[in-house]
Amino acid sequence: MRTTSDTLVTESFVSALYERYAEGLRRVRQEQRELYDRHRRAGGRAQLDDLEAEISYLLVRHTRPAALVEIGCLHGWSTSWLLRALRDNREGTLYSFDRTGAARRWVPPELSEGRWLFTEGDVRERVAELPDDIGYLFLDAAHSARFARWYLRTLLPRLAPGTVVSVHDVHHRARPLPGTEGAELLRWLCTAGITSFTVAAAKAPDVNARLRRLRVELGLAEPVHSGADDPMVFFTTPHPAGHSGPSLAEPAAAPGRVGHAEPR
């Protein structure tokens, strides 16, 4: 079936989210900075860089998914960002899948209680445990073309049109190496006519620089994580051709330019 997809996650859209949710993001960044320090001292690994982690938080805040699925969480760094977004939304459940149970040790219990369901094992063998109505899909697992073909064939058809999907480790370079998840995903997106958004320094250095300048203006410049690659891509699932369905609502105008209080 032919599909169509506008660019729903764009630089201007993300910039507006930064402005709208600046106050909450400032608080969460401090919480994550403290968690990162504990991670490092205890030997944990934090696998999301600052921009991609913040954008993930902002998109979850804005879309308010009732069911958020995370595939691949290792030591729970991305998990904690996503759980903070659900906490600040005051609704939603995160369903995480990983082949090891290490994340249970690292995710703060005050974040996980009442909003986190963790399943240990290969998600390809646990499909029945996925929620029926996935409102946001976050992928950071096996980075092989084979795994990409599995979720493109098995998971994406389950998603409603307009659902946000984010995939990590795509753009460590401008063009992913052949035979990788990134190469397979980008080929599929191109064939399907779906545009994607990235702030990866290797792929979109100008976008990366502009958002970093905006963060300085908003008082969000102090690093949380030492990495700066931000290789994640974001896109929304398409509508059938000729169908005009719901899309991401534009963020409401912020009451102030810098350091404003987010709307209640």
Image: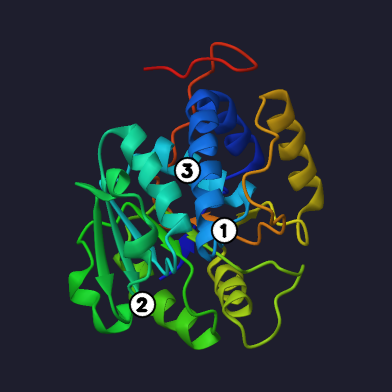
Q: Is residue 113 above or below residue 99?
A: above
On the image, the x and y values in percent for residue 215 come to 69, 32
Identify the mark nearer the N-term, 3 or 2: 3
Identify the mark nearer the N-term, 2 or 1: 1
Comparing 120 with 38, the one in front is 38
Q: What residue is rendered at 53% in x and 18% in y?
A: 253
Q: What residue is rendered at 57% in x and 58% in y?
A: 40
The image quadrant of residue 120 is bottom left
Q: Which mark is residue 40?
A: 1
Q: What residue is rendered at 32% in x and 73% in y?
A: 101
Q: Which mark is residue 100?
A: 2
171 vs 153, left or right, is right
Whole-angstrom CA distance, mark 3 to mark 2, is 24 Å
Amino acid type at image mark 2: Thr
On the image, the x and y values in percent for residue 217 come to 72, 24
Residue named by callout 3? 57
Comparing 158 with 54, the one in front is 54
On the image, the x and y values in percent for residue 62 come to 42, 36
Q: Is residue 241 visible?
A: no
Q: On the rendered image, what quadrant is the N terminus found in?
A: bottom left
Q: Is residue 19 visible?
A: yes
On the image, the x and y values in percent for residue 38 come to 50, 52
Q: On the rendered image, what quadrant is the C terminus found in?
A: top left
Regarding mark 1 in the picture, which secondary structure is present there?
helix
Q: Nearer the viewer, mark 2 or mark 1?
A: 1
Amino acid type at image mark 1: Arg
Q: Is residue 97 above or below residue 62?
A: below
